[in-house]
Amino acid sequence: MSAGEGKSGNSAGEADGVTVAAPSLSESSLNESSLSEPSLNESPRTAPSRSRSPQSRPSGSRSPQSGPLERRLHPVTPLRRAWAPLAFVAFLVKQDWARDWLLGLDKALLTAGVVLAVLASVAYGVQSWRCTYYALTDTELRIRTGLLFRRTAHLRLDRIQAVEVAEPLLARFLGVAKLKIDVIGTENKDELAFLGKKEARALRAELLALAAGFTPETAGGAGEAPARDLARVAPRMLAVAVLLNTAVWMAVLSGVFGAVAVWWLSDSVLAAGAALLSAGGAVWAVTGGRYLKEYDWTVGDSPDGLRLDHGLLDRQHETVPPGRVQAVRIVRPLLWRMKGWMRVELDVAGTSEGVLLPVTDPHTAQTVIARILPRTDLAAVREGLRPASRRARWVAPVRWRGWRWTADGTVFAASKGLLTQTLTLVPHAKAQSVRLTQGPVKRLLKLADVWVDTGADTTVVARGRDAQEALAIVVGQAERSRTGRRTAAPDRWMSGGGVVGDGQASGRPVVDGPVVGRRPAVGRGPAVGGPDGSGAVKDGEA
Amino acid sequence: MSVRQGAVEVEVDADWRGIPRELLRMRRLLLVLALAPLAVVSGGLLGWLLTPALAACAVLPLAGLAWGWRVLERNWRSWKYAERADDLLISRGVLWRELTIVPYGRMQLVEVTSGPLERYFGLASVRLRTAAAGTDACIPGLDPREAARLRDRLTELGETRSAGL
């Protein structure tokens, strides 16, 4: 990490070190002086009153002279830390040994201790809240936190994959929300918790607008552009879909069967009840829990991406930038196929799970997917799926029937599964590499598999193809992913080829992946260590 | 460096390059270092301590050595790579064959590494990283000059045809 490189106020963080996608570049040190950020070394300016939304910032607040404007989180934030000691006491009460010891203590002493612990944790919360700031510059979001260990995270705007606003139940009552930010190449999301509800939305809007390539001047108003509803999952449809889930019936059956078996063997109703209860928990997770999470699922269309809002108790608001979707998966469980329903999932680099629509009919799915893959006709792709070679039955006597593959001008698509059919579409522009593999058995059968790797660490496999066909697929795929790139939308999909923000040409590559070269000692060998990732956005190079 | 034609049914027509023989020498050395002491210990000790007939135990490691000696050569022959106008092809494997194609524009990072043993044999490995973890494109046992040339060329091509995610 070249954290010590000279940075000027405006292009701060544009230095190479910052493009390293270590989990949100952080510097830990005990003294502030090693922070390479001049603006962060100054004593923090007091945050403006919360009622001022980011848009109403004076335009000069981000000038290089004064540095970026730093803001604090919402004042209720420290309260969430107050729970910790109470939870600890509750945990102690549950333990037998600790309970005796606790009950043996003087009541007054105990109460005083608990109150003290709560106060201490609140005090710690307040302190840590006081030294947590965030600031938005033209190119990055900076988060500065840490009571003992200073940590400064610089999240590059052009690497933001998705921004979501989460409102846990309690936070909904208090009118605050969490902002979760996904950056390429990081394991976990960076969180800003908590912000005022309005502030969180405004900040999300601004982040997405900047990530989408609006200039900072226009970004203020662009983000919260009214979303147009593309799809809404009716509660009844969701309920039916949940009940039609094969896994649910499996769980119910096994639960009942298990309970009966336990009762039969142990002759104790209690044990049977316990068995039933544990099975019930599993059933609840895939029915009720899912229903609560996916209730009132709305997909909206806005200039900065697809808006997903869902949840009955905890509302979640996510925005998926279409330019960052690596693959689209269409899952069709057995019982849903009677109704022609499907579940649409997304692979976005950097996120673990991405559901686009928990349940939908083909027409709606097509409408929504068209927003991500504009030139893909889902029905045509499904029509075009070609079965695997018949010789593949020697490799997988049953499963081979589920292996299908097709490719058109825009996507590589492969499906698998007989009970639950999964069809994965990868836009050619997102294919990172193509591989053909052939083991000894498949070689005898003149078969081969074709693998397409995407940036979201998912791999799509067209299994059991005829060897010659597989070779044609691989060679053709290399060709297609090359041409697919040229016609693809730029990563900063709103810039449309214009000049963005600080003069970076739009559609500049967003380099991701851990650019960490092992650097063994250089002996007689060649110069060791990797050059920077291809086309890393370097300082002052525009 | 000569272009070798692999006699296999799955073959892409390109300007294939092989890998220097030093890699084979290195791997054979490792094989001998691993199995020869085993043969000596198992055969010698058992035969000397128990009965001479047990010295036949040395046959196993020796057979492994002979087999490995040939397999290593076949494997080494199977490694080849080709630089096309827009992508890099890497083909490898005898029983488990794999052909990897990485478009230049997708390369995030090109690494040249060379461990102590590799350095002794004057070898270096080139490893390509893309945004996908599944892409494991590595060419082992290249001449350091060739590795450096490849690295520079790939980096240059990666920049001109750049396309990240």
Image (tube, coloured by chain):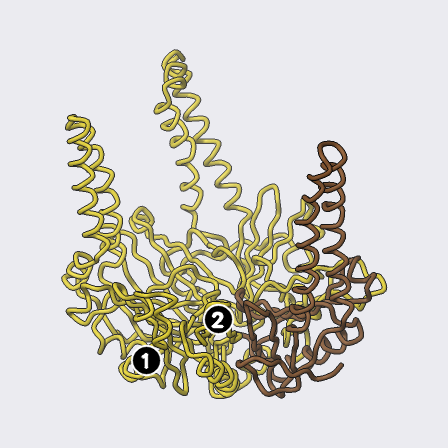
The image shows residue B116 at horizontal and vertical percentages of 79, 57
Q: Secondary structure at mark 1?
A: loop
Return the mark for residue A90: none
Q: Among all residues in the image, which is located at the extreme right?
A: A524
The image shows residue A61 at horizontal and vertical percentages of 56, 67
Task: Tell me which residue sits at (31%, 46%) in the image.
Answer: A170
Q: Are marks 2 and 1 on the same chain?
A: yes
In front of the other: A187 or A129? A187
In front of the other: A194 or A158? A158
Q: Is residue A148 above or below residue A450?
A: above
The image shows residue A298 at horizontal and vertical percentages of 26, 67
Report if the CB atoms under discs 2 and 1 are less than 8 Å apart.
no
Q: Which chain is brown?
A: B
Q: Quadrant of the C terminus of chain A?
A: bottom right
The number of callouts visible is 2
Depth-wise, is mark 2 or mark 1 nearer the camera? 1
Specify few, some or many for label 2: CA neighbours under 10 Å numbering under 14, 14-19, or 20 or more.
many
In front of the other: B47 or A99? B47
Return the mark for residue A454: 2
Q: Is residue A94 visible?
A: yes
Specify few, some or many for label 1: CA neighbours under 10 Å numbering under 14, 14-19, or 20 or more.
some
Distance from disc 2 to disc 1, alpha carbons, whole Å, reads 20 Å
Q: Is residue A17 above or below residue B5?
A: above
Subunit of label 1: A
Q: Which residue is mark 1?
A: A385
Report the side of A538 relative to B122 (left or right). Answer: left
Callout 1 amino acid: Leu
Task: Tell me which residue sits at (43%, 46%) in the image.
Answer: A77
Q: What is the drawing colour of chain A?
A: yellow
In front of the other: A397 or A170? A397
